[in-house]
Image (cartoon, rainbow, N blue to C red):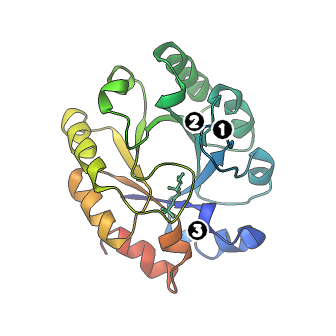
Amino acid sequence: MIIALSILSADLSHLQDEVDTIEQHADWLQIDVMDGHFVPNLSFGAPVIKNLKTKLLLDIHLMVENPEERVEEFLAVGAKHITFHAEVTDPEERSALIAAIHDGGATAGIAINPETPVEHIEGVLPDVDLILIMSVDPGFGGQKFMTSVLDKVRVIRGQYPRLMIQVDGGIDDQTAKQCTLAGANNLVSGSFIFGAKDRVAAIASLRGT
Ligand code: DX5
């Protein structure tokens, strides 16, 4: 199970310390890039990440209307995985985006919001390295997990035994179990980890240990 720490809920005034104290227990560091258009919130861009030192794999979640405009700058600051949203791309754009991300030496993921059916992206699943199944409406941390998305996890795991399935939104020790049983093998967690008294134990609970 890959655990991706979402920095959205970290103390952003001490971001480097927040990462330093916990990174050896996680696998990926997820950066929620929000443009205030595709999602109602605005977060951070490449300049913030450029100065962030981490040993974790840098996972960029582009919650932006024009993901093709963001790929280069995040590759330039060390992104090793980039996910864009199905809702803002059509099939042709997706192929070009995946190629650009791969050409930059990173893996590519496509994300679907809770209300987006799997059918909308079936054509692209053979080409991506990961599918991100949102279990909250994107834009904010600390929201409640939507159990309705577990069916999507099960369906995709059944059709694509080797595809990495990431779930993001409301992941805690309980919902992590449900996602794992459904077939997810990559979990994003922000407020559960950064809000925990014992962050190391919180991460271990997501791994079921
Ligand atoms: C929503 C964000 C969040 C964040 C994790 O747009 O993508 O899902 O990564 O949030 P929580 O606090 O629910 O783990």
Residue type indicated by callout 3: Glu
Disc on res. 140: none
Q: Is residue 22 above or below residue 145?
A: below
Between circles 1 and 3, the one closer to the viewer is 1
Helix, strand or loop at mark 3 = helix
- Separation (CA) of disc 3 from disc 2: 20 Å
Residue drawn at 74 percent across, 52 percent down: 49
What residue is shown with label 2? Answer: 106
Q: Earlier in the sequence, mark 2 or mark 1?
A: 1
Q: Secondary structure at mark 2?
A: loop
In the image, residue 143 lies at what x, y percent?
47, 62
Q: Amino acid at mark 2?
A: Ala
Q: Residue 77 location in percent, x, y?
A: 74, 44
In the image, 48 versus 65, the foreground residue is: 65
User: In the current view of this chain or complex, which residue is farthest to the left?
Assistant: 158
Residue drawn at 31 percent across, 51 percent down: 184
Query: What separation in Å lies between label 1 and label 3 (alpha carbons)?
Result: 31 Å
What residue sits right under mark 3 in the picture?
Answer: 23
Q: Is mark 2 within 8 Å of ligand 1?
A: no
The quadrant of the picture occupied by the N terminus is bottom left
The answer to whether residue 127 is above or below residue 52 is: above
Q: Position of residue 42 (x, y in %)?
A: 70, 49
Question: Which kind of residue does numbered mark 1 sit on?
Answer: His
Q: Which residue is mark 1?
A: 37
Q: Earlier in the sequence, mark 3 or mark 2?
A: 3
In the image, residue 12 sits, relative to residue 200, either above or below, namely above
Residue 155's spot in the image, x, y percent?
Answer: 21, 39
| Left or right, 40 with reference to 206 | right
> Which quadrant would the C terminus be assigned to in this image?
bottom left
Q: Tell me: residue 123, above or below residue 44.
A: above
Name, please, the residue furthest toward the front.
40
